[in-house]
Image (cartoon, grey):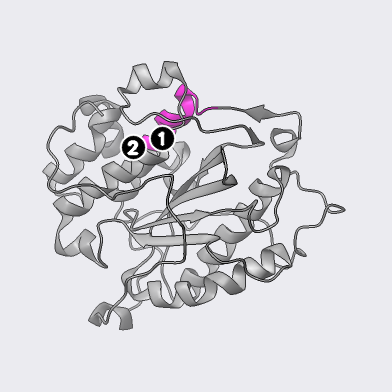
């Protein structure tokens, strides 16, 4: 993207033709025994998703999450200019408020037995479980996601999320249980892939520049399914067909969405100063991350 010319080290190698499996790197950190206040960042823990008591996906249960936006007739084949702009801003804002994305999670929903029209609902349930698991330990979650309809892989979702280093082992141990709960079926091998953004845990604190470089690379990958107008406007260089999706194509937690951003004057000033594509580089230069 324009405004980000120097890479500290190669970004995450994220290729579409890989064999996905559940991956996690974790170790012992003293911070694992500390609880972070949900109000520490100055933002509200305002993430609302369906109740986790909803039964597993069934062709006889409604799948419209978000109302008319998720009707079978509402299909898209690419990320639009507004989509890309909001995802870039949300990624940078998460770092700005101290909740940088640290995990890159891919879930192959169709491989797990969820049809295209059920992916938004299934993703919402996974996010709800992840958010509540962290909240129970006193940690706030920030995340953004993009749905794709990949050729050969079926419908899947990419999630960039802030997961505390001390929570990674715990969350990794719950992923398969959550997927069984959501799908109502036995876990299928290679359905979920979860990896650190930057290659190792806590790198967002131990080496912010390297983490930010890898975060930019991960964001580039997530935005690869943008339409031609968005590619031109934001100077995207990684371009692939994102496939046809039903319902909402992307989203983010409310604590890093447009309304949350509008309440922060310093953030508004930074946006005017840098423009959308300069936000992440500016944050690392100013030491906000």
Give the spatial CA distance, label 2 vs label 1.
5 Å
Q: Give the main secondary structure, helix, strand or loop, of the magenta stretch.
A: helix
At label 1, counting other C-alpha atoms closer than 10 Å, the crowd grade (few under 14, some 14-19, many 20 or more) is many
Residue 247 position within the rendered picture, expressed as x and y whole percent measured from the top left? 67, 36
Q: At numbered mark 2, what does the secondary structure look like: helix, strand or loop?
A: helix
Q: For the residues labelled 2 and 1, say whether their Cβ atoms are less than 8 Å apart.
A: yes
Residue 274 position within the rendered picture, expressed as x and y whole percent measured from the top left? 21, 28
Residue 262: tell me if it is visible: no
Residue 15 position within the rendered picture, expressed as x and y whole percent measured from the top left? 38, 45
Residue that extends furthest to the right in the rendered view of this protein: 60
**Rendered position, 100 above or below 34:** above
Queried whether the magenta region covers residue 85, the answer comes back as: yes
Q: What's the residue at 39%, 72% (across, down)? A: 168
Q: At numbered mark 1, what does the secondary structure look like: helix, strand or loop?
A: loop
Q: What's the residue at 63%, 69% (across, down)? A: 187
Residue 105 position within the rendered picture, expressed as x and y whole percent measured from the top left? 45, 56
Indicate which disc residue 220 carries: 2
Question: Between 270 and 143, which is closer to the camera in this rendering?
Answer: 143
Q: What's the residue at 45%, 56% (across, down)? A: 19
**Rendered position, 21 above or below 208:** below
Q: Pointer 1: what residue?
A: 223
Residue 106 is left or right of residue 11, and the answer is right
**Rendered position, 10 above or below 273:** below
What are the residue bounds of the magenta stretch? 78-88
At label 2, counting other C-alpha atoms closer than 10 Å, the crowd grade (few under 14, some 14-19, many 20 or more) is some
Residue 275 is left or right of residue 230, and the answer is left
Indicate which disc residue 102 carries: none
Residue 26 is left or right of residue 17, and the answer is left
Q: What's the residue at 70%, 53% (across, down)? A: 114
């Amino acid at each position: 993207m324009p405004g980000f010319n120097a890479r500290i080290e190669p970004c995450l190698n994220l290729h579409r033709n890989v064999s996905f499996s559940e991956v996690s790197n974790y170790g012992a950190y003293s911070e694992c025994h500390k609880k972070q206040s949900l109000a520490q960042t100055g933002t509200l823990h305002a993430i609302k998703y369906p109740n986790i008591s909803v039964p597993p996906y069934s062709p006889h249960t409604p799948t419209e999450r978000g109302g008319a936006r998720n009707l079978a007739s509402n299909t898209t084949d690419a990320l639009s200019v507004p989509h890309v702009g909001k995802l870039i801003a949300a990624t940078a804002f998460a770092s700005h408020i101290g909740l940088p994305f640290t995990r890159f999670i891919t879930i192959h929903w169709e491989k797990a037995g969820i049809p295209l029209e059920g992916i938004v609902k299934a993703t919402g349930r996974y996010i709800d479980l992840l958010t509540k698991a962290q909240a129970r330990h006193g940690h706030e979650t920030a995340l953004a996601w993009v749905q794709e309809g990949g050729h050969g892989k079926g419908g899947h979702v990419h999630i960039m999320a802030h997961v505390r280093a001390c929570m990674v082992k715990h969350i990794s141990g719950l992923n398969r249980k959550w997927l069984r709960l959501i799908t109502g079926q036995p876990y299928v091998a290679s359905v979920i892939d979860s990896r650190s953004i930057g290659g190792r845990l806590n790198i967002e604190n131990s080496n912010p520049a390297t983490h930010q470089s890898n975060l930019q690379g991960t964001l580039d990958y997530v935005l690869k399914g943008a339409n031609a107008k968005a590619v031109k406007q934001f100077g995207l260089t990684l371009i692939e067909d994102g496939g046809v999706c039903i319902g909402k194509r992307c989203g983010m937690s409310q604590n890093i969405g447009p309304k949350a951003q509008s309440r922060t004057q310093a953030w508004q000033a930074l946006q005017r100063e840098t423009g959308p594509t300069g936000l992440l580089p500016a944050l690392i230069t100013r030491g906000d991350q």
